[in-house]
Amino acid sequence: MQPFKQVPVFECGDFHLYESRAIVRYIARKYKGQGPSLFGSTLEEQAIVDQWSEAEAYQFSFSFLPWSLEYYVGRREERPLNEGVLKPFYDKLATFFDICESQLSKTKYLAGDFYSVVDLNIAPSLLRVMTLKPELITTRKHVKRWYDSLASRPAFRKMLQADEHWAFALNPSPAEILQALPA
């Protein structure tokens, strides 16, 4: 179903969709009006959601993915981490979180005072950051508050509960993560 032979794939009757961000946007649009808008209410709010969506995809994810992969591969292979590989990505992630800290000192969520697709898309990756290098989050007061807010959402907990019997290699189990989340 997925031409790149990856997950996720979304299936709804005869309709198939791949790429996680596209799936999230589709579901948010399909069920628009059944809850708060995940895209913002005004044109300006929607533009800020778009802006942070791009930042999450290109500033965060382009650094996060190779950075986290080196951690997991290094641990799996029981070899020292390649600091030469990690440092530039770590530095870019630190810069991203510094920018988030500034933004979150003014707003509850990245795109404003409303939960948006940006927060929804980044939340699972933030969980992995908390597993690998929690100081990227915990040393930034507003980023930590934001993470705690995302992690305490019922949907976040349901995601972990749905993954109860699945554990990514070298990650804490979903049950361990649930126990460590703020109440």
Image: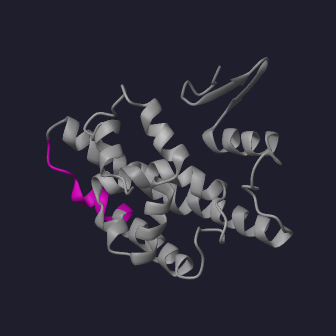
Q: How is the image coloured?
A: one colour
In the rendered structure, the answer to whether residue 68 lies left or right of residue 51 reads left
Question: Of all residues shown, which one is farthest toward the front?
Answer: 183
Question: Residue at image x 21%, y 35%?
Answer: 76
Question: Residue at image x 79%, y 45%?
Answer: 34
Q: Is residue 21 above or below residue 86?
A: above
Principal secondary structure, stretch drawn in magenta: helix
- Viewer-closest of 131 and 67: 131
Q: Is residue 47 above or below residue 179?
A: below
Q: Is residue 153 above or below residue 4?
A: below
Question: Residue at image x 67%, y 43%?
Answer: 24
In the rendered structure, the answer to whether residue 111 lies left or right of residue 95 reads right
Q: Is residue 170 above or below residue 111?
A: above
- Rendering coords of residue 40 (x, y %): 77, 63
- Rendering coords of residue 165 (x, y %): 36, 25
- Which region is colored magenta? 79-89
- Viewer-closest of 42 and 148: 148
- Rendering coords of residue 183 (x, y %): 39, 55
Tally of numbered discs: 0
- Rendering coords of residue 14 (x, y %): 79, 17
Question: Residue at image x 64%, y 65%?
Answer: 52
Q: Quadrant of the N terminus?
A: top right
In the rendered structure, the answer to whether residue 114 lies left or right of residue 153 reads right
